[in-house]
Structures are given as C-alpha cells and as structure tokens.
Image (spheres, coloured by chain):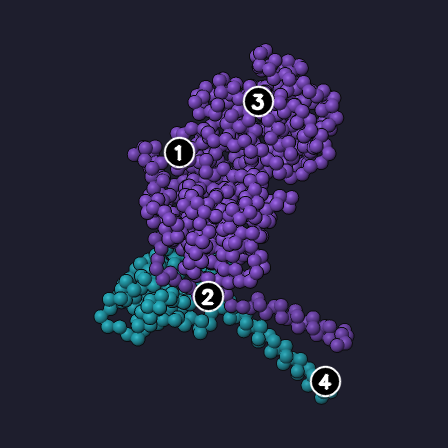
Chain colours: A cyan, B purple
C-alpha cells in the first residue's frame, strides 16, 4: 500500500514537472516576459515623444507608406545625438554603436503572427492615431505592450468602427 | 541491448516528447535597424527594377521585385518586344542562381593537383598579381573560351584578347550554327530570320522545339498563342514532325513521328509532291530551275526511308501549299544529325516554293541593331573549332586558358577531343560562378557577379522584327566577394597589358557601358522623351541603322553528335546531289538578292 502510494506520488510529480517545463517553454515562446522587454539602450519614449515632442513618424518613417512602421536607422539617432551639449553614459553607449559601425539590436515589443495580414499604411490612412493601438507612449518611461494584439481585440475595434470583419481581410 | 516492449515504449515516449520541444523555441524578437538608411528602401514596400534576363541568349526583358535590398521575384517586362511581359521557367529561376549556396564566394587559388577540386581562398589583390604574372609570361599565347556574350561586354572581351594578342572563342552547345549556315547558303544572309509564327495560318515544324527551348521560346510562345487564338475566325493549323512526342509535338494538331535524320528528305518529298501537283507559287522559268533538286528520289523511296506514307506526304504537300500563309521551320531534332545544314536548306526551299520569304507570316530577315560598333564579335563557334583550339593547345600555340561561364568538359560530347586544352594549358583562369567540371581544372578562379548584380546589355540578333537592344542593371548589391568581369578585364588591361592609355578610357565597366548608350541614344531619343539613362529602370529598344552581317564563314560542321544507319543512307544520298543543291541554292541566293530584298541589295554578299 505504502509502496503503491510512493510510486503514485512519483508519477504525479513527474507529470507536474513535465507540464511546468513545457508550459514555461511555451510561454517564453509566445507571451511576453519582463526580461524580454529590456532594451540594449535605455531609450525613453517619454522623453523623446513627450518632452521633446518628436512626432512618431519622424523616427518610424515607413508607417504611413508601408505595412511595417520601421525603426530609425542609427544615422537618424546620430543626427541629433552627435550634437548634444552633454553626453551621459547612456548616450555614450549609443555613440559607441555608431563608432563601431554596429546596428542596435532593439528588442521587438509588438509582433503579429505571420498568418495575420496587417498594414500600418492602411490604418493610419483611415485617420487612426498611433496612440489608439500603441498607447500614449509619450507618458511611459519604459514601453510595454499596450494591448494584447489578439484577434478579439482587433475585431472589437473593427466592429466598433464598421470596418470589414470578413475573414479574408486579415487572413489572406 | 535487449529491446523489449517496455524499453521500446519508453524510447517512443521520449522521442515524441523531444519532437515537441523545438516548437517551443522563441521566435526572432530582435529588430535590427539600418546603420545608414537607403533612400530607395522603405521597409515592407517593394521596388521593381527593369533589367534583362541572361539565362539564355534570347534576351527577354525582366522586372525584378526587390524588398529591403533582396531580390524576391522575377517577372517579364510587358514593354519588351521579345517576351511581352511573359517569362519562362528558366528566367523565373534566375534567383536560384543568385542565392545558390554553391556559388563561388571569392577568388580561389588551386591548392593541390589540377583537377582535384581543392582550392584555397585568396584576396583579389593576390588574384590580380598571380594572373598578371601569367598574362605577362604567356603574352601572345592566351585564349579565352566564353559563353556567347553581346554588346559592350563582347567588345571589351575582344579588346582585351587583342591587347594580349590572344584568341577569343564563344561557345554554346545550344547555338544554331546550322541555321545560320543554311541561311547563308540559301539566301546569302548569315543570320537568324524572324519566323513569323504569329501571322501564319499553317505551321509545318520539322522538329523545331519552339515551345520548349528553340531560339527564343518565350517570343515563340507568345507568337504561337496569337497564331492559335489571337485572330478572329482564324485558327492556325500546326503540324509537327519529330521522332519523339515532345512538349511541342504534344501541342500540335498533328504529330507525325518520323525516322530520325530523315526530316530533310521528307521536306524534299513534300516539295516534289507540290511541284508534281502544280501547287507551287513560282514562275515556270524558276520551276524549271528548281526541278532537278526534287528529281533524284521517287516519293515511294522517300516514304520508305522516312516512315511517312506516300499518301501522307501528298496530303501534307496539298495542305501546306493551299494554306493562305504557310510557314515551314526546322530545328531541334532535325538539326541533331550529320545532315543538319542540308535538312534546313531543304526546309528553306519549301518556304521558297510557297513564296513566303520576306512576307508577313513567313520568313523575314531584318537588320540587327549595330551596337556598340559591331555585333559580329558575338559569333559562337562549333565543336570543330573548339577541338582545333584544343589541338593548338597541345601543340603549344596557346598556353594560358581563360574560361567564362562555359563548361566545355561537360557540354561537349566525349567524341570531340578537347581534353588536351585542359591538360596542356600551363595555366587556367576561370571567371565562373560555380565549380563546374571545367572550372574544377582551373588554377585561379576570379568569380564574376551574378547577372542580377551587374550591368550588361544585350543586342538582339534575328527572331524579333524590331532591332532591339536591352540594358541590364544590378538589382541587388553583390552578395559575395565577387567582381564584375568587365571591371576585372579593364583592371587587367590597365595594369598588365601593353595598351595605350586611350584604349582603356573608362574607369569601370559601368562608365564604359554608359558612354556607349549615350552615343546610341543621343540622336534617337527625342529631347522631350521621358526615357533617359539617368532614370533607373530604363529598359528599352532602339531602332539602329546598320548593314547586314557581311562576314561569312564557309566552315561546315564536321563533328556530329550521332550517326545511325538510316542517317548514313541520307548523308550518302546528299553527297550525290550536293552539286544540284548548290546550283539551286545559288539561284535562291540570286532570287533573294534581286526580288525578295531589293532594299538590302547593297549589303548582301556577292
């Protein structure tokens, strides 16, 4: 009886262990962990978009003409940063990338799966503001994901604004 | 280890669990920005660059879709007169050549015995130094075997070989020597005509695989579509004679299997039946002159030799002669025998009999564009010349061999002795992008860019009615440490060969090409024309004046691919009436000169 109990416990423990392990692997693959959001440079949207009042499309230049918003080239960062009065350790880190001729390996925060067809150009063209999907980044010190970007979230907005809810609109 | 049921189940369970793990891998989650932005690149938006396809010699116009600096897809250019927006499978697959993992990624030097295929990477500077030393040492004894190139590169190559007092040979196994030879002997024109398939209403093809690979398959594909379905109330009829049920044969209204090598004989039979039934559109005097050509063999014996019945031959003759716009073409399998030139001459004679030479829906000759100075440089040679060159290598006349995008060791049949060229050459330089059989014998490899990475131009000879020149531009930055052959040759001329500085005026090949195009366009493009060289993506055609090919060679191909008994019997028969043939063809030449091309009179030979 006692032996059967222990064997049962071992089986349960192993099953639980495997489930936890696989679950962790799954969640790191698809969901967001705090560690993943740590950027190589301490870039602040709050400072650039908020205090300096730089327009979104000044840096994310492709947003109005392409599916992807694009991220600024290192040269574009340097167009201002080269002429700063006082450099801080963080801005020096940026200059180091430029001097080594290396691109900055930014961590991607927003991602849609490959089976979703989405274009920034079309959404901005209808008069949507960046903040409606991405949140008011000008008030955020660190930029998290502002929404789930899952299908229900897309559809609620599509329904609210009378946009197409045909499957093939997004799943081409 | 004992594999019992329990162990097996354990292992199966572990394997199943293991196979699930890779699915949990993290997706790529880094965003790498450009260091320097490119004005022409908007991430996520495609750019289309116009260029020319260089997979074969047809010179189709292409549009290449490029995203973020990477070529993704190739389509036909709708404004190009050759392919009119269409493209064949080979053209579509040119991207596979660009991204091929087996491409040679930088200059290589032989490391080991010749032919072992072991190489060590070197820098371009080292490559130039080694090559330069060899060029100086073998001055006057250099040779280059290249795939046929045209336009600016052809001129540069011949200048390079002239500067080193060497010999330049263009070789392509699929080239149409016999077609040109037959036209030279029939009409005195050393060129490929336009076979106006689009406007004929009865097409008799002697093995010409025009829907697969013949001359310019995309052009003929478009023309064939027009012949069948492009005209209201007229659907052209297509009869194909070939031993094999090829793709082209499968498209025909009638496929007539024929004994290989007897196509010319059948053409003579059809002509004979036409003459006999009085279906020939020639004056009585001309008929009297051409009759001896058809008098040698009875229809019965032709039927026996060709495996096509007498009734069939007569039926074909009636159909052909009574059509409003008949056209006979020959190529492919009918040009794979020792009697290929004779066969094509007999087919030309059929076109003469129905009077379709120089007419719409028939065989028409057009002057090719003269660009840059002469298009005669891009004549390719036969296997016979190649084997003679090999002999000269064996005798020591040549000792430094250059190879450019050609693989004679693979393409030339073993019966043609060319191994000597590779065994006896003291040094072999290859500009190839791939380590093929011939390049594996090289001592030094200086790899060329892919055509999608380099500037080029292409002069159309024959096939289309309009003199056409295509301009090819790089659509992506070079992927590997390669250099364009034009730049490499110019650099070598500047550094190693005794040329006058004014012979090498251009800094690089692009500058040279640009100068040649500016000369061409300066008085041909109206000043208000929106097209100009400055705009990227220009790919145009231009009418250019110039004479017919004047040079003509009397070399006949001695080296043949195969022989069999039925073939030999035809060859022997050919020998008997070659004299008649030549007489008739001289007549045809006179006729061509005086009646068919009055405008071209001055430019014809004799």
Q: Which mark is residue B481?
A: none
State which quarter of the image contains the N terminus of chain A.
bottom right
**CB within 8 Å, label 3 to label 2:** no
Q: Based on the displayed image, in which of its 4 quarters is residue B13 positioned?
A: bottom right
Q: Estimate the x, y position of residue A86 in percent, counting from the top left.
A: 24, 72
Alpha-carbon span between mark 2 and mark 1:
50 Å
Q: Nearer the viewer, residue B106 or B315?
A: B106
Q: Is mark 2 on a helix, strand or loop?
A: loop
Residue B359 versus residue B420 in the image, above or below: above
Please name which of the two marks, 3 or 2, marks the residue nearer to the observer: 3
Q: Can residue B76 be seen in this view?
A: no
Whether callout 4 and callout 3 share a subunit is answered no
Q: Which residue is drawn at 69% across and 29% down?
A: B572
Please name which of the two marks, 4 or 3, marks the residue nearer to the observer: 3
Q: Estimate the x, y position of residue A92 in percent, counting from the top left.
A: 30, 72
Crowding at mark 4 (Cα within 10 Å: few <14, some 14-19, many 20+): few
């Amino acid at each position: 009886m006692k032996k059967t109990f222990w064997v049962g416990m071992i089986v349960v423990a192993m099953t639980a262990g495997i489930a936890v392990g696989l679950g962790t692997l799954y969640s790191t693959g698809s969901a967001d962990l705090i560690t993943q959001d740590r950027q190589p440079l301490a870039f602040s949207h709050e400072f650039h978009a908020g205090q300096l009042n730089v327009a979104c499309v000044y840096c994310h230049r492709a947003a109005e003409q392409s599916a992807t918003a694009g991220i600024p080239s290192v040269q574009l960062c340097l167009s201002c940063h080269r002429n700063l009065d006082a450099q801080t350790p963080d801005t020096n880190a940026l200059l180091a990338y430029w001097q080594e001729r290396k691109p900055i390996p930014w961590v991607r925060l927003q991602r849609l799966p490959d089976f979703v067809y989405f274009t920034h150009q079309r959404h901005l063209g209808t008069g949507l503001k960046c903040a409606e999907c991405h949140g008011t980044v000008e008030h955020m010190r660190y930029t998290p994901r502002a929404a789930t970007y899952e299908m229900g979230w897309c559809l609620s907005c599509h329904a609210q604004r009378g946009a197409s809810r045909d499957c093939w609109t997004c799943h081409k | 280890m004992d594999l019992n049921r329990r162990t097996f189940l354990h292992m199966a369970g572990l394997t199943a669990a293991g196979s699930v793990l890779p699915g949990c891998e993290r997706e790529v989650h880094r965003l790498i920005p450009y260091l320097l932005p490119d004005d022409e690149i908007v991430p996520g938006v495609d750019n289309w660059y116009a260029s020319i396809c260089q997979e074969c010699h047809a010179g189709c116009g292409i549009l290449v879709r490029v995203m973020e600096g990477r070529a993704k897809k190739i389509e036909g250019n709708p404004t190009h007169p050759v392919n009119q927006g269409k493209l064949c499978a080979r053209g579509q697959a040119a991207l596979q050549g660009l991204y091929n993992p087996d491409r040679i990624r930088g200059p290589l030097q032989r490391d080991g015995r010749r032919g072992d295929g072991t190489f060590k990477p070197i820098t371009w500077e080292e490559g130039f130094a080694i090559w330069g030393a060899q060029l100086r040492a073998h001055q006057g004894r250099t040779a280059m075997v290249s795939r046929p190139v045209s336009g600016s590169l052809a001129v540069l190559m011949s200048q390079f070989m002239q500067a080193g007092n060497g010999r330049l040979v263009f070789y392509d196994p699929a080239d149409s020597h016999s077609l040109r030879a037959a036209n030279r002997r029939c009409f005195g024109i050393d060129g490929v005509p336009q076979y106006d398939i689009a406007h004929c209403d009865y097409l008799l093809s002697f093995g010409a695989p025009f829907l697969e690979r013949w001359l310019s398959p995309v052009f003929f594909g478009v023309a064939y579509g027009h012949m069948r379905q492009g005209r209201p109330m007229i659907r052209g009829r297509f009869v194909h004679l070939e031993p094999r049920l090829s793709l082209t044969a499968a498209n025909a209204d009638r496929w007539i299997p024929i004994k290989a090598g007897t196509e010319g004989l059948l053409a003579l039979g059809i002509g004979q039946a036409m003459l006999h039934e009085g279906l020939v559109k020639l004056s009585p005097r001309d008929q009297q002159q051409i009759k001896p050509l058809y008098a040698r063999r009875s229809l019965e014996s032709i039927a026996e030799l060709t495996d096509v019945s007498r009734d069939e031959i007569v039926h074909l003759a009636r159909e052909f002669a009574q059509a409003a716009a008949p056209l006979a073409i020959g190529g492919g399998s009918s040009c794979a025998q020792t009697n290929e030139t004779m066969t094509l001459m007999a087919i030309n004679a059929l076109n003469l009999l129905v009077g379709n030479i120089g007419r719409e829906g028939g065989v028409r000759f057009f002057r090719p564009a003269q660009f840059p100075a002469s298009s005669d440089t891009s004549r390719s040679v036969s296997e016979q010349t190649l084997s003679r060159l090999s002999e000269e290598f064996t005798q020591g006349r040549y000792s430094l061999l250059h190879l450019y995008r050609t693989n004679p060791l693979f393409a030339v049949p073993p019966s043609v002795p060319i191994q000597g060229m590779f065994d006896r050459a003291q040094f072999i330089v290859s500009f190839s992008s791939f380590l093929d059989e011939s390049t594996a014998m090289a001592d030094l490899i200086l790899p060329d860019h892919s055509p999608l990475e380099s500037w080029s131009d292409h002069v159309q000879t024959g096939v289309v009615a309009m003199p056409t020149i295509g301009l090819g531009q790089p659509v992506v930055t070079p992927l590997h440490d390669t250099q364009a052959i034009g730049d490499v040759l110019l650099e070598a001329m500047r550094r190693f060969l005794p040329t006058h500085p004014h012979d090498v005026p251009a800094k690089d090949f692009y500058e040279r090409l640009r100068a040649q195009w500016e000369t061409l366009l300066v008085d041909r493009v109206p000043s208000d024309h929106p097209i100009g060289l400055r705009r990227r993506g220009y790919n145009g055609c231009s009418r250019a004046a110039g004479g017919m090919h004047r040079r003509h060679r009397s070399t006949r191909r001695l080296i043949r691919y195969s022989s069999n008994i039925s073939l030999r019997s035809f060859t022997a028969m050919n020998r008997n009436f070659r004299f008649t043939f030549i007489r008739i063809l001289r007549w045809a030449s006179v006729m061509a000169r005086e009646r068919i091309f009055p405008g071209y009179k001055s430019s014809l030979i004799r």
